[in-house]
Image: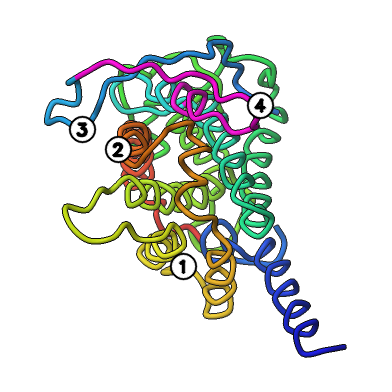
Amino acid sequence: MGVKSKAAAAILVLLLFLGSLWLHGGLDYHWDSCFKGYNQVNKLHQLYNSSGGDGAEGLQVLEGCPGQNFQVSLLLSHLLAVPAYSSDVLMLPYLSSWDELVRFMEALGPMVGLISKEIETKTSIIRQLAALAGESPEAELAPDINSINIVSTEAGTKNDPEASQHTGAYHSVRSMIVAEMTQGVVDFQQQTDSGCRTLLRLHRALLWLKLFLEKLAETPVSGRLRSPSELCREAYQNTLSQHHTWFVRRAAELAFIALPERGFFFRLVCVQDQEELSLVLNRVVQAIGEVYDRTQNALEENGMLDLP
């Protein structure tokens, strides 16, 4: 076998490891490792241009982008459906947002696609937990008079009183936290297959993608636009790398080298130039930020930011 063949084989092995270890310490600390998709029928989604101070300078329409799996219009629709009450996060559109983000990552090529498989594993865990709890995987959960009250003080939570009555255990982030705390499935000392632990790993990955898209949307006043590979690596170094081993960090950097150039992202989001890309991505980043902040607050209030 030639030197080039050996090098290619070595890279492939590293990337296969990456697929299972990608969020080691993030989505998953170990080697080991239903709701169905939230259906969105509208192919058009109105959004406000978030480039101005008040985020509402003009109205745009995002249309479905033909001939590709990833649809930024659907991603934004799911993200905007996630916030509930004044501080909660609905689980169904949250997971559907991840479904679309997985398609986004898969569109970037097979190397990054390996990373998305680990995220799919995590969303499947929460969907399976919901199914085991007897909650409908086909549609958003209806109120359940026998379900847990999510302002339970016995679980030691500080939850939104507006969301306090009659929702399924996996209806939202806060209801899931209370249900799993009450059932004793969340362990603060060792790993358990809880929805809360799984959510934390997804939460950390969401920050990485948020920062990457935010950087991709930047338009420098002067100088060149940096490559997506460079931006993704920088976003990773500021987020997920802090939870990863040296081996996983090196493997991740190999995957980022293979990211397509900026023109590919224009086509992926169906825009013509950087200015249009910035308008669309800034709105997506804003929506992700709202979801992230609400999830962060719920986890922090319950001491879950460092679950093993």
How far across and down, in percent of the image, does residue 165 sit?
Answer: 42, 14
Disc 4 to disc 2, C-alpha distance: 37 Å
- Labelled disc at residue 51: 3
Residue at 54% x, 49% y: name it: 186
Residue 51 in which image quadrant: top left
Mark 4 or mark 2: which is in front?
Answer: 2
Residue at 46% x, 40% y: name it: 266
How far across and down, in percent of the image, does residue 70 sit?
Answer: 59, 33
* Furthest-left residue in this view: 53
Mark 2 or mark 1: which is in front?
Answer: 2
How far across and down, in percent of the image, does residue 291 sit?
Answer: 37, 34
Mark 3 or mark 4: which is in front?
Answer: 3
Q: Amino acid at mark 2?
A: Glu
Residue 41 visible: yes
The residue tagged 4 is: 35
The front one of 190 and 54 is: 54
Disc 3 to disc 1, C-alpha distance: 32 Å
Proximity of marks 3 and 4: CB atoms separated by less than 8 Å: no
Dot 4, crowdedness within 10 Å: few (<14), some or many (≥20)? many
The front one of 275 and 181 is: 275
Residue 145 visible: no
Q: Up-down: is 211 above or below 75?
A: below
Q: Amino acid at mark 4?
A: Phe
- Labelled disc at residue 243: 1
Q: Up-down: is 202 above or below 1?
A: above
- Magenta residues, start to end: 58-78
Dot 3 or dot 1: first in sequence order is 3
Q: Up-down: is 109 above or below 148?
A: below
Q: Amino acid at mark 3?
A: Ser
